[in-house]
Amino acid sequence: MLEGGSVGESVALDGASTTESGGWSHRHILSLDHFSVQDFDTVLQTATSFQEVLSRRTKKVPALQGQLVTHLFFEPSTRTRSSFELAAKRLSADVLNFSPGTSSLTKGETILDTAKTYLAMGTNIMVIRHKQTGVPQAIAAEMDRLNTGVCVLNAGDGQHAHPSQALLDLYTLCSVVDRDRPRTDNLRGKKIAIVGDVLHSRVARSNLWSLVASGAEVHLAGPPTLVPQDFGGFLGNNRPIPIHWTLDDALVDADFVMTLRLQKERMGQFLLPSLREYHRQFGITRDRLKLCQPSVKILHPGPTNRGVELDSDIMDDPDLSLVSCQVTSGIAVRMALLYLVGSGKGLGT
Amino acid sequence: MLEGGSVGESVALDGASTTESGGWSHRHILSLDHFSVQDFDTVLQTATSFQEVLSRRTKKVPALQGQLVTHLFFEPSTRTRSSFELAAKRLSADVLNFSPGTSSLTKGETILDTAKTYLAMGTNIMVIRHKQTGVPQAIAAEMDRLNTGVCVLNAGDGQHAHPSQALLDLYTLCSVVDRDRPRTDNLRGKKIAIVGDVLHSRVARSNLWSLVASGAEVHLAGPPTLVPQDFGGFLGNNRPIPIHWTLDDALVDADFVMTLRLQKERMGQFLLPSLREYHRQFGITRDRLKLCQPSVKILHPGPTNRGVELDSDIMDDPDLSLVSCQVTSGIAVRMALLYLVGSGKGLGT
Amino acid sequence: MLEGGSVGESVALDGASTTESGGWSHRHILSLDHFSVQDFDTVLQTATSFQEVLSRRTKKVPALQGQLVTHLFFEPSTRTRSSFELAAKRLSADVLNFSPGTSSLTKGETILDTAKTYLAMGTNIMVIRHKQTGVPQAIAAEMDRLNTGVCVLNAGDGQHAHPSQALLDLYTLCSVVDRDRPRTDNLRGKKIAIVGDVLHSRVARSNLWSLVASGAEVHLAGPPTLVPQDFGGFLGNNRPIPIHWTLDDALVDADFVMTLRLQKERMGQFLLPSLREYHRQFGITRDRLKLCQPSVKILHPGPTNRGVELDSDIMDDPDLSLVSCQVTSGIAVRMALLYLVGSGKGLGT
């Protein structure tokens, strides 16, 4: 542990010094709206360092030793919570998990008071998920107002943002183009189709910011009820995002297809006729992928409804599916995020 | 870790030697009935050492390395479980969490058998919460009967006792008077009003023992249904505890006001007319605090019903509220309790 | 930690070299059907080494440092999950717990996809419990098909197998005969009565393999609905297992009595008249034990229904009951299993 630790620290510090020159300035990571291209590249670069750490026998570095990372997951989650937890442990942080089932929430305590309780216990970084938009932002604002120095990472809020997912997607995409040197520039001019329930997807919203900033050519596809005409306007820049209500238009010459999870409750809301109808119109099949670039790769944030968003055999084909790579990247990217905010560099905002 | 560890140990041992001269003699901490003033001061002194440890970069000491602390929380809890868990980890103990939701309880196993299962796994310290009075006592008695050497800490049983909460309250109160040297003597002659549902509160019961032993002048206030006439008699000493059925009498010249959580289910039991009515009669407001000493401070064990037990702006005013200090003190005090029973000093019974 | 660690490693490596000469060849431990007598003895021998580690002050060895053990418990469990978790931590592994309550299972993800998610996070060993027979096997097959090198330990699947329980039972039994040198040979010719709901018991099924392989003389007893006439045939060897529909025949001269947990839902399935009737016919009482060898010992996998499978005072009599020994052995045996598959020895299949 000592040997791995000290070597680990030097690598981590390498990452940090690169970072410092890159000028990391975010105390919190709440959404990707205000990320500069430099910010995205700093995350990619730092994650690359940690990916190397994860390939060693001892996968731990002492970067956040003595720091307390608290996971406040007001909404249940398998992969995101496990991924953040493992990332925090591999940075040698202490970890507390707040799980709403066995909590004071039912006792009428406000969310801010729950957060302040964990602040008072000595929390340095809060990783927060909530089904309601804006909760991580509200907690971050309160932490700043109180001058606590606490960093907040948004692990998914309502239909608003899921920045760590978008950043691990970015890392995955850029690594496909250049495994050793993932950087935003790798995506310049690449056509990326985002397919499915864009309207309700925090994953899609966060990905739009990072992909557009990277210079990718993003297309949206889905039924009109899930990809409204005016959706692309939300980016507020001069490049309108093309919207397609048929899948084929979006797939033509695509380099990457990013499928989104279809919530089954959309049916009850009269937004979808049936899963079978959805799959017939927007499900990814081998046949349809012939419209794409020969090297096309498929992403999905998981958990997947096999046979709905994409055919089962595509998901299992390592030449096509990046689903496992996304999960693997998640550890290194979340280590990078915890490290960037937690190692005392993110004091600007 | 090594450096922090060894330095930490020396500090912890300092604490211990002070303790040894103080003659710590409790194997279990089940209630505060039999605590001597010396016992209270030993806890305060040991917690002060650990508060210093917590201010370092590396917050860990190897005091309980190789020991297994098991949390048996038959009743859900946010802050107490997290606080004990963090305290145990910072003493380098191994930690197991037993959570009733995913347990054998539904399979008909007795509570004693659950405890014996964790004993057989090598548990050295059990931290126990149960909604029924007497469960930690019953488990402790069984552990003693079997000569196991296991130590039991009561983390709240029914309406009976919550010793770690009362001890962290004591630490918080004494620290207000003398930050560097919290000791029971600091409270001599201080007027402390305990306000609210005293009848059902294990926090109030445990606090009465420590505050009266410290020489504080304790007053109880609340509606007659929640603070019965004969309540003060339970201490069984010659100093009757003054009881007030109007708030103002209790607040006059008070140095500290300890508010208690109001369980909403008291309404359904016809013990309270309404939350609004309760707040009108016993809620702490800025206006009412003018009756107290100018330096008055407010405590609440949490979770708080803002606008019921106390006005929201009072809770957020760091010049008035000690709520966050209580949570912070909780880590150091629980480290002290785990250390005192776990480091082999508490062999008398 | 360092000192304990390095000494620990040497002991562990001792265990390993013995193991290597013993030729450990199982990547997974899914059931005990294919275990050779040598395999059983390797487990016993390795567990003996770890039992010695657990008697030290520092109970940790760095054997699995840097490895990730994920517990996928689709079915709730107290003792088995805690036991595996503690075993993994004491081997210095990183640990992730997947709990179905807060999971993606409700979101429609397949079990294999859940497993692959944790694979992609870097899991080296999966410990799996599921109420359906065959789930650990299916996951292990998929892990092999993908050439992942991941090891799977079955922590209980349906009514099929519970190998770690049978192995800790074996260790407990052999230790009674020779505390310092538990080996299968110790059981040769010993009469062991397995009493109760054999039909639905994965514990009984797994124990049959290990006990018969050890040369013990196994007898089954229970009502015909729970121990069918043709049950013994399932072993498929030439020695039929004697079946008794009255308890006394099974107990005569028994060296060990292994009681099984009675699921209360069997009553609703018309397999049992009542708990009282069951206890009258098959409950273990002091009186009935007079039929056994004077040195007879009782086992139960837990959790126990006191007064149903066995009288309460028998369970509490350390001269008769091995229940606590079983739980204690569980830690050392599970450390052995994690070590044997995880330390890179189990590459044959």
Image (spheres, coloured by chain):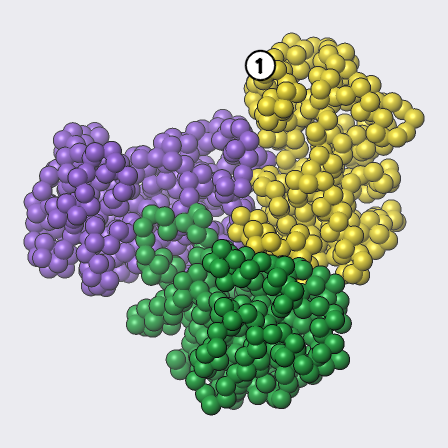
Chain colours: A green, B purple, C yellow
* Direction from residue C55 to residue A225 in the image, left or right: left
Residue drawn at x 72%, y 74% is A289
Which three-letter amino acid code belongs to the residue tagged 1?
Arg
How far from the left and from the top, in percent, is residue C64? 69, 56
Asked if residue A7 is positioned above or below residue B86 in the image, the reply reads: below
Residue with the mark numbered 1 = C276
Q: Residues within 10 Å of mark 1 (few under 14, many from 20)?
A: few
Dividing the picture into quadrants, the one containing residue B166 is: top left
Dividing the picture into quadrants, the one containing residue B73 is: top left
Residue drawn at x 48%, y 46% is B343
Asked if residue C345 is positioned above or below residue B238 in the image, the reply reads: below
Comparing C181 with B107, the one in front is B107
Kindly identify which chain the residue marked by label 1 belongs to.
C
Comparing C146 with B118, the one in front is C146
How far from the left and from the top, in percent, is residue A241? 52, 83
Whether residue A291 can be seen here:
yes
Residue drawn at x 59%, y 85% is A216
How far from the left and from the top, in percent, is residue B216? 18, 45
Comparing C49 with A79, the one in front is A79
Residue drawn at x 61%, y 61% is A277
